[in-house]
Image: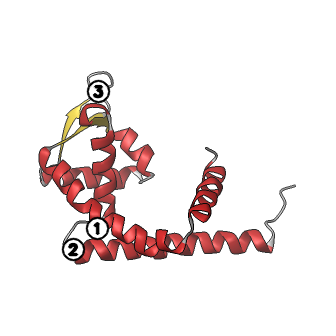
Amino acid sequence: MVSKPTPAVIEAWERLVRTEKTLLDKVEEHLKRAGFPPLEWYHVLHEVDASTKGMVRQTEVQDRTKLAQYNVCRLVDRLEREGLVERHQCQVDGRNNVLVITAKGRALRRAMWPVYAAAIEEHFGARLSQADAEQLAGLMAKLAGT
């Protein structure tokens, strides 16, 4: 028989979900006010830029960003149309695409970072001590199983 979550666990879950949504909305607002595209653009560009030689399989971006496959496909279409990434067929696995960041994509990611970093600090970092941040990071890793 599966046990039910305790009231404390339910409250923690609800707060986690609400807090994530609230913080992401605040970050999105900062980016929007600065004239930048949505946060998901940054995360995809970051994953491609951070990868070896500025290229990565599209499925790896999906795994790392935790975006749904159909969202990644549509987002990559937009990034490609904007000239921020190039998509090539994988030579090893023809069913997969390899994403390559362009100079324009790298420049956009770098331009977005100061706004993103400021939003993280204002709405998250400024409210936590170093010890709090370390403890929270540890708890999140525990929940993620890493």
Q: Secondary structure at mark 2?
A: loop
- Asked whether residue 124 appears in the rendered view, the answer is no
Q: Secondary structure at mark 3?
A: loop
Q: Which sits earlier in the primary sequence, circle 1 or circle 3?
A: 3
Residue at image point 27% right, 71% down? 31
Number of labels in the image equals 3
Horizontal relation, residue 36 to residue 15: left or right: left
* Residue where numbered disc 2 is placed: 34
Mark 2 vs mark 3: in front: 2
Q: Which sits earlier in the primary sequence, circle 1 or circle 2?
A: 2
* Residue where numbered disc 1 is placed: 115
Judge the density around disc 1: few (<14), some (14-19), many (≥20) Cα neighbours within 10 Å.
some
**Decide: marks 1, 2 in contact (CB < 8 A)?**
yes
Q: Is 100 in front, or is 123? A: 123
- Identify which amino acid the numbered label 1 is placed on: Val
Judge the density around disc 3: few (<14), some (14-19), many (≥20) Cα neighbours within 10 Å.
few
* Residue where numbered disc 3 is placed: 94
Question: Residue 146 at what x, y percent from top left?
Answer: 61, 44
Question: Residue 109 at what x, y percent from top left?
Answer: 24, 54
> In which quadrant of the rendered image does the N terminus lie?
bottom right
